[in-house]
Amino acid sequence: TDYRHTSYKLGVQGFSSIGNMRVEYRKSDLDDKTANPIDRESEQLTITAFTKVPRLKTVFLSGGYIYRTDNETTYNTEIKTNQLWGGTKYYFLKNNSIEYRIKFARTDNSAMSIETDNWVNSLTYGRTWKNTGGIRVGYESRIVDDLVNRSESNGLIVDGWYKAGTHLIFRGKASTRSKDIPTGSTLLGDESITRHLFSARYTDLNYGDLTLRLDKRIRKNEDIGVNTQIDYTSASSILNFKYEKYGSLNVTYSYYLGEFENRDLVSETIKNYEFSDHVITGTITPNSYRNIDLSFGGTYYRSRRDQDKEKFSLNIIAKYKFPHDHILEIKYDVFNYDDYQLNRNYYTANIIEINFIKAIKL
């Protein structure tokens, strides 16, 4: 690889007694210096606003606009997107609320001469019990239309939380969504998706918190095969430990189990595909010492069953704070990847990054 990547962003945010507004501009340029270069650039303008309705203390309005262009300059290909969204939320009877959101986006692909429209509408009802729990029930509809192919989907969602005492909180979520193709065709065709999520978190104000999480997803695609189904399950634990005298420690462990099944296929190898992944991450952040901040982290990934892959990364970050809000930052990253099913399919990488940072206060 041989490239140069430049990116920057500029933003401004204003506040008033009835709301706030934020404007942000981002630009990114990738200069590919290889033998067959594919240069890319992108720009994005984002405007968001939030306000109360005058004389109506229980009604809130929000909205925004996003304009984005992505260019592949070598072959002069451009993707342009205009997106508008808005919403309103109404509180009534103290702890009850109703929220409505609408989003519209149009994407123009110059290379394929295709314009795609996306519509999203959602309506939710929420109820909270002070310091005890809450529940939310919602409906969502989506439409994707490029004048040839059209997909329509409808979904329901239910989520809630319950606080058991001062240290323990439980959260749960269930959702289902079905998609139909009334005209034309898409790659996956008709499908239905079901998801269940449950988590529990124990918090100690002096030493940190521990979170346990279980996520289950099922996707069915009848157009691919009458019995095509994808099951995906993940279980994870997140530990955030802090000790005032020395610093903090973050450790996560995640286990992912996936299975693809298609009984219509003849080949058993293709018919059933499974993977199970183990991912461990950790970060140690000592307390600052004489204007020096340090951080040590790493990630280990191991995939089994129908895959046999291993990769890990280590990173070290050092910052020194000079007077007048000047900061010198040095990052060192090490990456390693091995695919044991393929001969000589591995790579390693070492990256050093140096940043000079100046904080500006207005």
Image (cartoon, rainbow, N blue to C red):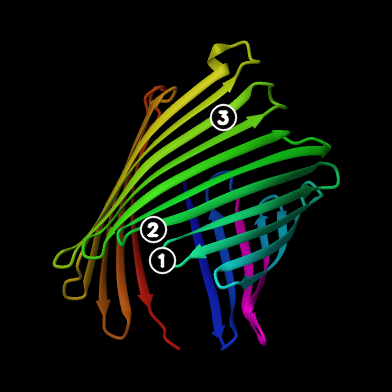
Sequence-wise first label, 3 or 2:
2
Q: Where is residue 280 in the image (x, y as percent from the top left)?
A: 31, 42
Q: Main secondary structure of the magenta part?
A: strand
Contact, CB < 8 Å: mark 1 with mark 2?
yes
Q: In this view, does 24 lie above or below 191?
A: below
Q: Where is residue 118 in the image (x, y as percent from the top left)?
A: 74, 53
Q: Which amino acid does label 3 sit on?
A: Ile
Residue 289, position as x, y percentages in the image: 16, 72
Q: Which mark is residue 353?
A: none
Q: For the residue marked with disc 2, what is the amino acid?
A: Lys
Q: Give the range drawn in magenta.
A: 38-67
Disc 1 to disc 3: CB gap under 8 Å = no
Q: Quadrant of residue 317?
A: bottom left
* Residue 84 in which image quadrant: bottom right
Q: Which of 236 and 196 is in front in this view?
A: 196
In this orientation, which residue lies closer to the viewer: 107 or 171?
Answer: 171
* Residue 234 lies in the magenta stretch: no
In this figure, which residue is indicated by the disc labeled 2? 163
